[in-house]
Image: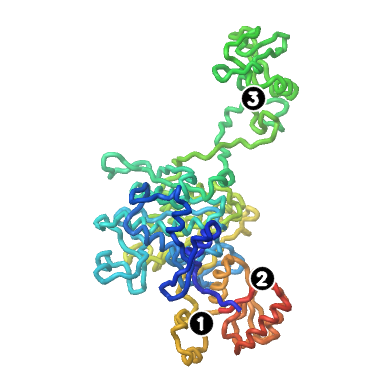
Amino acid sequence: MDKMRMESVDLTQKNIEKIYELFPSVVTEKRGEDGKIKKAINFELLRQLLSSEAIEGDEAYEFTWVGKKEAVAEAGRPIRKTLRPSKEESKNWDLTENLYIEGDNLEVLKLLQESYLGKVKMIYIDPPYNTGKDFVYKDSFNQSKGDYEQNLGVIDEEGNRLFQNTETNGRFHSDWCSMIYPRMVLSRNLLKDDGVIFISIDDNEVDNMIKICDEVFGESNFVTNLIWQKKTGASDAKGIATITEYILVYSKSESQIKKIFTKNRESYDLNRYKYEDELKEKRGPYYIDNLDRGGLQYSDSLNYGIECPDGTITYPNGRTEYKNEGWIWKWSKDKVEWARKTGFIEFRRSNTKESGWSVCYKNYLQVDNEDNAIERSAPHKNIITDVLNANAAKAMKDIFSINLFNYSKPFELIKRLISYVNCEDEIILDFFSGSATTAHAVMKLNAEDYGNRKFIMVQLPEVVDEKSEANKAGFNNICEIGKERIRRAGEKIIDENKGAGGVGDLDFGFRVFKLDDSNMKDVYYSADQMTQDLLEQLESNIKENRTDLDLLYGSLLEWGLPLSLPYSSEAIGGATIHVVNDGDLIACFDSAISEEVVQEIANRRPLRVVFRDDSFENTPAKINVEEIFKLLAPNTRVKVI
């Protein structure tokens, strides 16, 4: 019976496995720091296999900084952490598909690698801008007291991973790049093939952010740099007022670009469609355009005569006879005949044409010129000028009566970005969620178009300033503000839409999870260093303060199952079993599980089953469980923790 790892996936080993599929001869073995044999790459041999492509020597075009190698390695380094559910802080726990996760986003992203691999449609993040006053994530705990003081004292006794990145720091930009790089790598893994990421940034790091995204996502997956006008002026500007910020947009796969984005349905000028005919009900109003044109590529087959209502034959440019002067009709003879019969051609008298006639065609609002029903639209533009940053403070005051958060984006801006993406029934992730503006935007847009978008918010529980309005209002950290905002915003949206059918049935809840150390005792991971006598004295390898729900959701993470799946608990034969999504997984964490319970679980033929390692008295009991499943549920995978 296999044991669960109880740690995040080792992405380095996963990458080695991918290389093995292409070049099996370059994969070898070596002994790791823990003394265990692991797969490794023979880079010299790999260079030989790619000799025509490999870059030799010291000079190469590349983007690098002090600490980049460590940042690259950090993205693939596994951790022994877990996400513990907090039902008491959640809203509508049993039915919601939304998640709010408290913890360092680097570690949370690592834990989500299997459960949400390729499942997220859209990511929006608003990371620290590195203005010289920002607090950015510091991904190394190993600091001396001197380093602690040098970094302005923001790694506290609880291990908060923040430090102030001031311009006096010699690695000002390097530290920021090292912070953001592994998070970009991990977030890309979570995107669907037709997924997209939006990144808010300003002048301080936009160049580095583009270089990092070009490396992680690929230059060909750059979509656009959205320009957002956040204010109308700046009285304290030095010379020229900067009133804009950037929103970088990258796709996961260039080949999927047409599936990602919606169209701007309000891009056309409705006033242009000012004519009507007897086909208005089907085709809508129309405007006219000349059927002839000149100066473009000439084709003799498009230079022919058309009979006008009075019998006159007119050629392109209103001529009365054939001439090659570069003018042609836009449509072929056959299409013109079809258009005359179906009402797409309109003849108009002209005093400037030799023939006395202008031949025009109708552009209808609701059909194309083949009479196919269409919805007029155009691509969204890369500039947003009608949503100001002042809206953010107003939204917070509407919810809390005071502005509790100084640096949030307007939810209208995030709602606009979400509306650019085909994501009506998809997952939207924000792992720098701040005051949960993205969650607010998701709920608001769902209420407007009855979508079923789900959100995942991730935020470090940063302590608020003691002198802040948030602290005075009773909030200790940013996560408390974010969760309360989601609760109140949801209630406000429901109240604003009273009488609108179906809005009350939308998902305004969220499940809360908190990053914590592994559910397993430390000794569990160093058992090879323990004596047999000491091992026999251990009653359990699971920490005493961990509940069945802690173990259940730790198992979901390892199995790669979403944390939003429905589950139920029931009593069987004196034991409690937990059933996830009608049999995707069944777990029982009781001690001394009877054969009756094991048989009942096996008879249900779930896809996966998890027990505690100490649920069975001895090895023969474990073997008996394996035999029961081989007989009753041979396709069920069984593991223990």
| Residue located 32% across and 67% down the image | 466
* Horizontal side of residue 597 vs 460, given as left or right: right
Disc number at residue 323?
none
Tag 2 and tag 1, C-beta contact below 8 Å: no
Is residue 287 placed above or below 589 in the rendered structure? above
> Mark 1 vs mark 3: which is more N-terminal?
3
Residue 229 coordinates in the image, percent (x, y): 41, 42
Residue closest to the eye, 602 or 62: 62
- Tell me the distance, in whole angstroms, between the alpha carbons under discs 2 and 3: 63 Å
- Tell me the distance, in whole angstroms, between the alpha carbons under discs 1 and 3: 76 Å
Disc number at residue 275?
3
Q: Quadrant of residue 288?
A: top right
| Residue located 51% across and 74% down the image | 6
> Mark 2 vs mark 1: which is more N-terminal?
1
Disc number at residue 607?
2
Q: Quadrant of the N terminus?
A: bottom right
Residue closest to the eye, 357 or 553: 553
Q: Quadrant of residue 310?
A: top right
Check disc 3: other Cα within 10 Å, few if <14, some if 14-19, many if 20+. some
Tag 1 and tag 3, C-beta contact below 8 Å: no
Check disc 1: other Cα within 10 Å, few if <14, some if 14-19, many if 20+. many
| Residue located 45% across and 69% down the image | 30
Q: Mark 2, mark 3: which one is toward the viewer?
A: 2
Q: Amino acid at mark 3?
A: Tyr
- Element type where label 1 sits in the image: loop
> Mark 2 vs mark 3: which is more N-terminal?
3
Q: Quadrant of residue 268?
A: top right
